[in-house]
Image: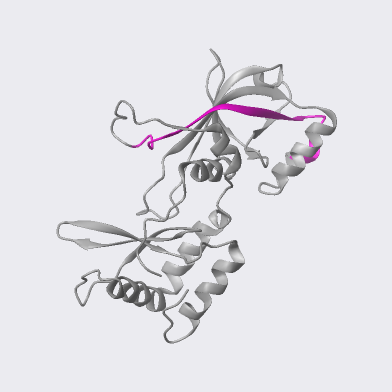
Amino acid sequence: MPPSRMQPSRAELARTLVSSTTLATVVAGDLPAVTGVRHGADADGRVLLICHRGDPLTTGARDVFVEIADEPPLPFSPGWGRVRIGGRAIPLSGTAARVAADVVATTLPDPDLLDIGHGTVIVEVVPSRVTLLPRRSEPHEAHGSELVIDLADYRDAGPDPVAPMERPLLVDLVDHHGPQLYPFLRRQLVASGVDLPADCLPCLLRLDRYGMLVSVPDGDGTACYRLCFTPPLDGQQDLLDRLHPVLFHDRCDHT
């Protein structure tokens, strides 16, 4: 599990955020921004918004921006910014609405999805522009900080399969498995040539299908390293299978 530059592509990150359960903000023309919008995404990355009948978005087709921010799993974890999807929003009806509701339910089994065709409307946003932006908490967005993602790359990418379990797993690892996890991470870094003081234990920050992001003290600051999974994880069970010997055996340096 050596340090690596392997990490999600921008398109994969965008698809992961769009497929998350983090509430979205939707801006449509001169209308006030709508916050707290529930959503899902289909296999091509179209955004599927859960709206109440009578909401402005449900009255007809219109151009919108949908913005979804990354929520760091731990208080000290870095954030990956936010994705902004620009495109045409189209209220769905009939079979298309029911199919879309089934898609959303795979990641967000919201009771309102049972009311499709009555009080609930699915609004589909077909992306025409996809960008990644810094977190809103950053002091000032420098000119040119918006990263445009090729639409073909966006459609071809997939969401990270382990993203839904990142937060609960990291909380569990930090709260209950520190005595096994931290020495393991330290051994991996030292074996790869990272010079660590004897009393220094790495801090686990983030987790994705490509590996773990860890930090270690470095003078007055911290240095971050990615420890990669080789090959990348293919799902949540794969992650659990690789972590099991680390957490439940005295020593194992292979994941």
Q: Answer above or below: position of 54 versus 248.
A: above
Q: Residue at x 34, y 77 (%)?
A: 183
Q: Is residue 22 above or below residue 143?
A: below
78 with respect to 53 (left or right): left
Q: Which residues are magenta?
A: 113-137
Residue occupying the point 46% across, 63% down: 171
Which residue is situated farthest in the bottom direction here? Answer: 250
Q: Is residue 110 left or right of residue 181?
A: right
Q: Eyeballing the image, is 32 above or below 117?
A: above
Res 116 visible:
no
What x and y, as percent, mark residue 110?
70, 44
The quarter of the picture where residue 154 lies is top right
Residue 50 image offset from top left, x and y in percent: 68, 33
Identify the residue at horizontal 54%, vertical 67% (top origin).
Answer: 239
**What residue occupies the far left of the structure in this picture?**
219
Residue 130 is covered by the magenta coloring: yes
Could one spot residue 158 in this view of the protein? yes
Asked if residue 9 lies left or right of residue 51, the reply is left
Residue 71, position as x, y percentages in the image: 46, 46
The N terminus sits in image quarter: bottom left
Instruction: State the image coordinates of residue 226 (x, y, percent, origin top left).
Output: 36, 60
